Image (tube, rainbow, N blue to C red):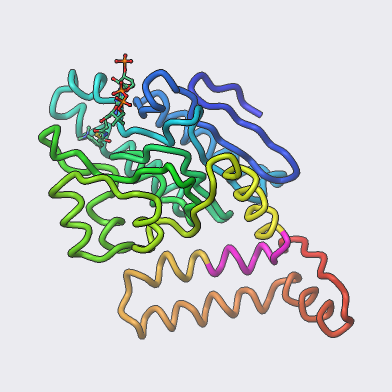
Amino acid sequence: MVELKNLLMELEEGILTITINRPKVLNALNTETLNEIRTAIKEARESDAVKVVIITGAGEKSFVAGADIAQMRDLEVLEGRTMTMLGQDVFSEIENLDKPVIAAVNGYALGGGCEMAMACDIRIASKNAKFGQPEVNLGIIPGFGGTQRLPRLIGKGRAKYYIFTSEMITAQEAYNFGLADKVVDPEELMVKVKEAAKALMAKAPVAIMMAKRAINNGIDMDLDSGIAYEAEAYTTTFASQDRVEGMNAFVEKRKANFQGK
Ligand code: DAK
Protein backbone atom coordinates (compact mmCIF):
# COMPACT_ATOMS: atom_id res chain seq x y z
CA MET A 1 0.00 0.00 0.00
CA VAL A 2 1.44 3.40 -0.98
CA GLU A 3 2.29 5.90 1.78
CA LEU A 4 0.60 9.26 1.29
CA LYS A 5 1.04 12.49 3.21
CA ASN A 6 -2.57 13.61 3.51
CA LEU A 7 -4.40 10.27 3.44
CA LEU A 8 -4.54 7.24 5.67
CA MET A 9 -4.99 4.01 3.72
CA GLU A 10 -6.05 0.76 5.32
CA LEU A 11 -6.78 -2.44 3.45
CA GLU A 12 -8.60 -5.01 5.53
CA GLU A 13 -10.39 -8.08 4.19
CA GLY A 14 -10.98 -6.55 0.77
CA ILE A 15 -12.14 -3.17 2.10
CA LEU A 16 -9.89 -0.21 1.31
CA THR A 17 -10.60 2.66 3.70
CA ILE A 18 -9.27 6.01 2.50
CA THR A 19 -9.27 8.62 5.26
CA ILE A 20 -8.66 12.25 4.33
CA ASN A 21 -6.27 13.20 7.11
CA ARG A 22 -5.99 16.98 7.51
CA PRO A 23 -8.11 17.36 10.66
CA LYS A 24 -6.58 20.76 11.58
CA VAL A 25 -8.30 22.27 8.54
CA LEU A 26 -11.34 20.00 8.76
CA ASN A 27 -9.87 17.81 5.97
CA ALA A 28 -10.03 20.59 3.36
CA LEU A 29 -8.82 19.46 -0.06
CA ASN A 30 -5.70 21.11 -1.43
CA THR A 31 -4.24 20.09 -4.79
CA GLU A 32 -1.75 17.73 -3.13
CA THR A 33 -4.59 15.89 -1.39
CA LEU A 34 -6.63 15.72 -4.60
CA ASN A 35 -3.63 14.21 -6.38
CA GLU A 36 -3.19 11.71 -3.57
CA ILE A 37 -6.87 10.70 -3.81
CA ARG A 38 -6.24 10.09 -7.50
CA THR A 39 -3.29 7.81 -6.57
CA ALA A 40 -5.44 5.96 -4.02
CA ILE A 41 -8.23 5.40 -6.54
CA LYS A 42 -5.71 4.14 -9.09
CA GLU A 43 -4.47 1.65 -6.50
CA ALA A 44 -8.08 0.59 -5.81
CA ARG A 45 -8.68 0.13 -9.54
CA GLU A 46 -5.54 -1.92 -10.15
CA SER A 47 -5.42 -4.09 -7.02
CA ASP A 48 -7.36 -7.36 -7.07
CA ALA A 49 -7.20 -7.31 -3.27
CA VAL A 50 -9.52 -4.28 -3.15
CA LYS A 51 -13.20 -5.18 -3.47
CA VAL A 52 -14.94 -2.15 -1.94
CA VAL A 53 -13.72 1.37 -1.11
CA ILE A 54 -14.76 3.53 1.83
CA ILE A 55 -13.93 7.25 1.88
CA THR A 56 -14.13 9.18 5.14
CA GLY A 57 -12.53 12.09 7.00
CA ALA A 58 -10.22 12.06 10.03
CA GLY A 59 -11.59 13.29 13.35
CA GLU A 60 -15.14 13.57 14.58
CA LYS A 61 -16.02 16.97 13.22
CA SER A 62 -15.63 16.82 9.49
CA PHE A 63 -15.79 14.59 6.46
CA VAL A 64 -14.32 17.29 4.20
CA ALA A 65 -15.07 21.01 4.70
CA GLY A 66 -14.45 21.81 1.05
CA ALA A 67 -11.60 22.80 -1.18
CA ASP A 68 -8.75 24.45 0.72
CA ILE A 69 -9.82 28.10 0.75
CA ALA A 70 -6.40 29.31 1.91
CA GLN A 71 -4.76 27.70 -1.11
CA MET A 72 -7.53 28.78 -3.52
CA ARG A 73 -7.32 32.40 -2.42
CA ASP A 74 -3.87 32.80 -3.98
CA LEU A 75 -4.59 31.11 -7.31
CA GLU A 76 -4.43 32.92 -10.63
CA VAL A 77 -7.43 32.45 -12.94
CA LEU A 78 -5.88 29.67 -15.01
CA GLU A 79 -4.52 27.95 -11.92
CA GLY A 80 -8.09 28.01 -10.57
CA ARG A 81 -9.27 26.37 -13.78
CA THR A 82 -6.58 23.69 -13.45
CA MET A 83 -7.69 23.00 -9.87
CA THR A 84 -11.34 22.74 -10.89
CA MET A 85 -10.46 20.29 -13.64
CA LEU A 86 -8.28 18.27 -11.29
CA GLY A 87 -11.15 17.97 -8.77
CA GLN A 88 -13.66 17.15 -11.51
CA ASP A 89 -11.38 14.46 -12.96
CA VAL A 90 -10.60 12.87 -9.60
CA PHE A 91 -14.28 12.77 -8.62
CA SER A 92 -15.19 11.26 -12.01
CA GLU A 93 -12.56 8.59 -11.39
CA ILE A 94 -14.28 7.82 -8.06
CA GLU A 95 -17.68 7.76 -9.76
CA ASN A 96 -16.49 5.49 -12.57
CA LEU A 97 -14.41 3.07 -10.50
CA ASP A 98 -15.60 -0.45 -11.32
CA LYS A 99 -15.88 -1.23 -7.59
CA PRO A 100 -18.42 0.18 -5.14
CA VAL A 101 -17.42 3.29 -3.20
CA ILE A 102 -19.14 4.24 0.06
CA ALA A 103 -18.80 7.70 1.63
CA ALA A 104 -18.82 7.53 5.43
CA VAL A 105 -19.91 11.10 6.13
CA ASN A 106 -18.79 11.84 9.67
CA GLY A 107 -19.43 15.59 9.98
CA TYR A 108 -19.18 18.57 7.62
CA ALA A 109 -19.46 17.65 3.94
CA LEU A 110 -19.30 21.13 2.47
CA GLY A 111 -18.36 22.40 -0.98
CA GLY A 112 -15.83 19.98 -2.43
CA GLY A 113 -16.64 17.62 0.47
CA CYS A 114 -20.30 17.39 -0.52
CA GLU A 115 -19.17 17.04 -4.13
CA MET A 116 -16.82 14.18 -3.23
CA ALA A 117 -19.55 12.41 -1.25
CA MET A 118 -21.89 12.77 -4.24
CA ALA A 119 -19.31 11.14 -6.53
CA CYS A 120 -19.42 8.04 -4.30
CA ASP A 121 -22.02 5.36 -4.98
CA ILE A 122 -23.57 5.30 -1.51
CA ARG A 123 -23.57 7.87 1.29
CA ILE A 124 -23.96 6.73 4.88
CA ALA A 125 -24.10 9.71 7.20
CA SER A 126 -23.71 10.07 10.94
CA LYS A 127 -26.52 12.00 12.65
CA ASN A 128 -24.21 14.98 13.08
CA ALA A 129 -23.30 15.20 9.39
CA LYS A 130 -23.99 18.48 7.62
CA PHE A 131 -24.01 18.74 3.86
CA GLY A 132 -23.91 21.94 1.84
CA GLN A 133 -22.60 23.91 -1.12
CA PRO A 134 -21.65 27.28 0.40
CA GLU A 135 -19.42 28.48 -2.46
CA VAL A 136 -21.46 31.57 -3.26
CA ASN A 137 -20.34 32.94 0.12
CA LEU A 138 -16.86 33.01 -1.40
CA GLY A 139 -17.88 34.54 -4.72
CA ILE A 140 -17.60 31.26 -6.63
CA ILE A 141 -19.92 28.41 -7.57
CA PRO A 142 -19.48 24.69 -6.91
CA GLY A 143 -16.62 23.67 -9.19
CA PHE A 144 -16.15 19.95 -8.60
CA GLY A 145 -19.45 18.81 -10.12
CA GLY A 146 -21.86 20.18 -7.49
CA THR A 147 -24.09 22.10 -9.90
CA GLN A 148 -24.55 18.87 -11.85
CA ARG A 149 -24.65 16.08 -9.27
CA LEU A 150 -26.72 17.85 -6.59
CA PRO A 151 -29.77 18.48 -8.87
CA ARG A 152 -29.52 14.91 -10.16
CA LEU A 153 -29.73 13.63 -6.59
CA ILE A 154 -32.18 16.00 -4.90
CA GLY A 155 -33.94 17.76 -7.81
CA LYS A 156 -33.40 21.06 -9.60
CA GLY A 157 -35.47 23.28 -7.31
CA ARG A 158 -33.94 22.06 -4.06
CA ALA A 159 -30.43 22.17 -5.54
CA LYS A 160 -30.96 25.81 -6.50
CA TYR A 161 -32.32 26.58 -3.04
CA TYR A 162 -29.33 25.10 -1.23
CA ILE A 163 -26.68 26.39 -3.66
CA PHE A 164 -28.16 29.93 -3.74
CA THR A 165 -28.71 30.16 0.05
CA SER A 166 -25.63 28.15 1.21
CA GLU A 167 -27.92 26.72 3.92
CA MET A 168 -26.56 23.53 5.43
CA ILE A 169 -28.52 20.31 4.98
CA THR A 170 -28.84 18.18 8.12
CA ALA A 171 -28.29 14.43 7.96
CA GLN A 172 -32.02 13.78 8.35
CA GLU A 173 -32.89 16.26 5.59
CA ALA A 174 -30.21 14.70 3.39
CA TYR A 175 -31.84 11.33 3.98
CA ASN A 176 -35.29 12.71 3.17
CA PHE A 177 -33.94 14.28 -0.05
CA GLY A 178 -32.04 11.16 -1.22
CA LEU A 179 -28.64 12.74 -0.62
CA ALA A 180 -27.84 10.33 2.24
CA ASP A 181 -28.87 6.70 1.91
CA LYS A 182 -28.73 5.89 5.61
CA VAL A 183 -28.30 7.89 8.83
CA VAL A 184 -26.69 6.27 11.86
CA ASP A 185 -25.40 7.25 15.31
CA PRO A 186 -21.93 8.83 15.10
CA GLU A 187 -20.28 6.13 17.21
CA GLU A 188 -21.76 3.44 14.97
CA LEU A 189 -20.82 5.02 11.65
CA MET A 190 -17.76 2.96 10.73
CA VAL A 191 -19.32 -0.28 12.02
CA LYS A 192 -22.40 0.25 9.85
CA VAL A 193 -20.36 1.34 6.83
CA LYS A 194 -18.15 -1.75 7.10
CA GLU A 195 -21.26 -3.94 7.44
CA ALA A 196 -22.57 -2.37 4.23
CA ALA A 197 -19.20 -2.92 2.53
CA LYS A 198 -19.18 -6.59 3.57
CA ALA A 199 -22.75 -7.02 2.31
CA LEU A 200 -21.65 -5.66 -1.09
CA MET A 201 -18.63 -7.97 -1.13
CA ALA A 202 -20.92 -11.00 -0.85
CA LYS A 203 -22.58 -10.09 -4.16
CA ALA A 204 -21.36 -10.92 -7.66
CA PRO A 205 -18.65 -8.35 -8.51
CA VAL A 206 -19.30 -8.42 -12.26
CA ALA A 207 -23.00 -7.79 -11.62
CA ILE A 208 -22.25 -4.87 -9.27
CA MET A 209 -19.83 -3.42 -11.83
CA MET A 210 -22.33 -3.69 -14.67
CA ALA A 211 -25.20 -2.33 -12.56
CA LYS A 212 -23.01 0.65 -11.64
CA ARG A 213 -22.14 1.29 -15.30
CA ALA A 214 -25.77 0.95 -16.40
CA ILE A 215 -26.98 3.40 -13.74
CA ASN A 216 -24.15 5.91 -14.21
CA ASN A 217 -24.30 5.93 -17.99
CA GLY A 218 -28.04 5.46 -18.36
CA ILE A 219 -29.06 8.33 -16.08
CA ASP A 220 -27.93 10.89 -18.66
CA MET A 221 -29.54 9.11 -21.63
CA ASP A 222 -33.10 9.14 -22.89
CA LEU A 223 -35.06 6.13 -21.60
CA ASP A 224 -34.86 4.04 -24.78
CA SER A 225 -31.08 4.49 -25.00
CA GLY A 226 -30.72 3.67 -21.29
CA ILE A 227 -32.80 0.53 -21.68
CA ALA A 228 -30.68 -0.51 -24.69
CA TYR A 229 -27.52 0.09 -22.62
CA GLU A 230 -29.01 -2.02 -19.84
CA ALA A 231 -29.57 -4.92 -22.27
CA GLU A 232 -25.88 -4.87 -23.21
CA ALA A 233 -24.77 -4.66 -19.58
CA TYR A 234 -27.14 -7.50 -18.72
CA THR A 235 -25.70 -9.60 -21.54
CA THR A 236 -22.22 -9.07 -20.14
CA THR A 237 -23.33 -10.41 -16.74
CA PHE A 238 -24.90 -13.37 -18.50
CA ALA A 239 -21.50 -14.24 -20.00
CA SER A 240 -19.79 -14.16 -16.59
CA GLN A 241 -18.71 -17.11 -14.46
CA ASP A 242 -20.39 -15.30 -11.55
CA ARG A 243 -23.75 -15.75 -13.30
CA VAL A 244 -23.19 -19.50 -13.67
CA GLU A 245 -22.08 -19.76 -10.04
CA GLY A 246 -24.98 -17.62 -8.76
CA MET A 247 -27.62 -19.65 -10.55
CA ASN A 248 -26.01 -23.01 -9.70
CA ALA A 249 -25.76 -21.99 -6.04
CA PHE A 250 -29.45 -21.05 -5.98
CA VAL A 251 -30.57 -24.34 -7.54
CA GLU A 252 -28.20 -26.35 -5.31
CA LYS A 253 -29.41 -24.40 -2.22
CA ARG A 254 -25.93 -23.26 -1.19
CA LYS A 255 -24.14 -19.95 -0.75
CA ALA A 256 -22.58 -18.62 -3.96
CA ASN A 257 -18.81 -18.30 -4.11
CA PHE A 258 -18.28 -15.50 -6.60
CA GLN A 259 -14.88 -14.97 -8.22
CA GLY A 260 -15.55 -11.70 -10.02
CA LYS A 261 -15.02 -13.28 -13.44
N1 DAK B 1 -10.34 25.45 3.63
C1 DAK B 1 -9.29 25.74 4.43
N2 DAK B 1 -9.36 25.75 5.77
C2 DAK B 1 -10.53 25.43 6.33
C3 DAK B 1 -11.69 25.12 5.57
C4 DAK B 1 -11.55 25.13 4.13
N3 DAK B 1 -12.55 24.80 3.31
N4 DAK B 1 -12.71 24.88 6.41
C5 DAK B 1 -12.22 25.01 7.66
N5 DAK B 1 -10.92 25.36 7.63
C6 DAK B 1 -10.01 25.60 8.76
C7 DAK B 1 -10.34 26.93 9.45
O1 DAK B 1 -9.73 28.00 8.78
C8 DAK B 1 -9.76 26.67 10.83
O2 DAK B 1 -8.36 26.85 10.77
P1 DAK B 1 -7.57 27.60 11.97
O3 DAK B 1 -8.24 28.93 12.10
O4 DAK B 1 -7.78 26.71 13.17
O5 DAK B 1 -6.16 27.65 11.50
C9 DAK B 1 -10.03 25.19 11.07
O6 DAK B 1 -10.24 24.62 9.77
C10 DAK B 1 -11.26 24.93 11.92
O7 DAK B 1 -12.35 25.63 11.32
P2 DAK B 1 -13.27 26.66 12.15
O8 DAK B 1 -12.52 27.27 13.28
O9 DAK B 1 -13.90 27.57 11.15
O10 DAK B 1 -14.34 25.65 12.75
P3 DAK B 1 -15.86 25.97 13.11
O11 DAK B 1 -16.34 24.78 13.84
O12 DAK B 1 -16.01 27.29 13.75
O13 DAK B 1 -16.62 26.04 11.68
C11 DAK B 1 -17.13 25.34 9.44
C12 DAK B 1 -16.68 24.92 10.86
C13 DAK B 1 -17.05 24.10 8.54
C14 DAK B 1 -18.61 25.80 9.49
C15 DAK B 1 -16.25 26.49 8.92
O14 DAK B 1 -14.88 26.08 9.07
C16 DAK B 1 -16.46 26.83 7.48
O15 DAK B 1 -17.43 27.50 7.13
N6 DAK B 1 -15.54 26.36 6.63
C17 DAK B 1 -15.58 26.68 5.20
C18 DAK B 1 -16.62 25.85 4.54
C19 DAK B 1 -16.71 26.19 3.08
O16 DAK B 1 -17.02 27.30 2.68
N7 DAK B 1 -16.50 25.19 2.30
C20 DAK B 1 -16.57 25.31 0.85
C21 DAK B 1 -15.20 25.63 0.39
S1 DAK B 1 -15.27 26.10 -1.29
C22 DAK B 1 -12.62 25.72 -7.68
C23 DAK B 1 -13.04 24.45 -7.77
C24 DAK B 1 -13.78 23.89 -6.75
C25 DAK B 1 -14.09 24.62 -5.66
C26 DAK B 1 -13.66 25.88 -5.59
C27 DAK B 1 -12.95 26.43 -6.59
N8 DAK B 1 -11.74 26.31 -8.65
C28 DAK B 1 -12.31 27.26 -9.55
C29 DAK B 1 -10.40 26.51 -8.17
C30 DAK B 1 -14.75 24.10 -4.53
C31 DAK B 1 -14.83 24.98 -3.52
C32 DAK B 1 -15.12 24.71 -2.16
O17 DAK B 1 -15.19 23.59 -1.71
242 relative to 62, above or below: below
155 relative to 40, above or below: below
152 relative to 243, above or below: above
Mark count: 0
Q: In which quarter of the image is residue 17?
A: top right
Foreground of the two, 195 or 248: 195
239 relative to 182, above or below: below
Foreground of the two, 167 or 219: 167
At x 48%, y 56%, the residue is: 121
Foreground of the two, 210 or 64: 64
At x 50%, y 51%, the residue is: 124
Q: Which residue lies furthest to the left in this view?
A: 139
Q: In which quarter of the image is residue 207?
A: bottom right
> Which SS type dominates the magenta stretch?
helix
At x 37%, y 21%, the residue is: 25
Q: Is residue 100 left or right of residue 120?
A: right
Q: Give the range drawn in magenta.
A: 202-211
Quarter, ligand 1: top left
Residue 41 percent location from the top left of the image: 53, 40
Q: Is residue 232 left or right of residue 198?
A: left
Which quadrant: the C terminus? Answer: bottom right
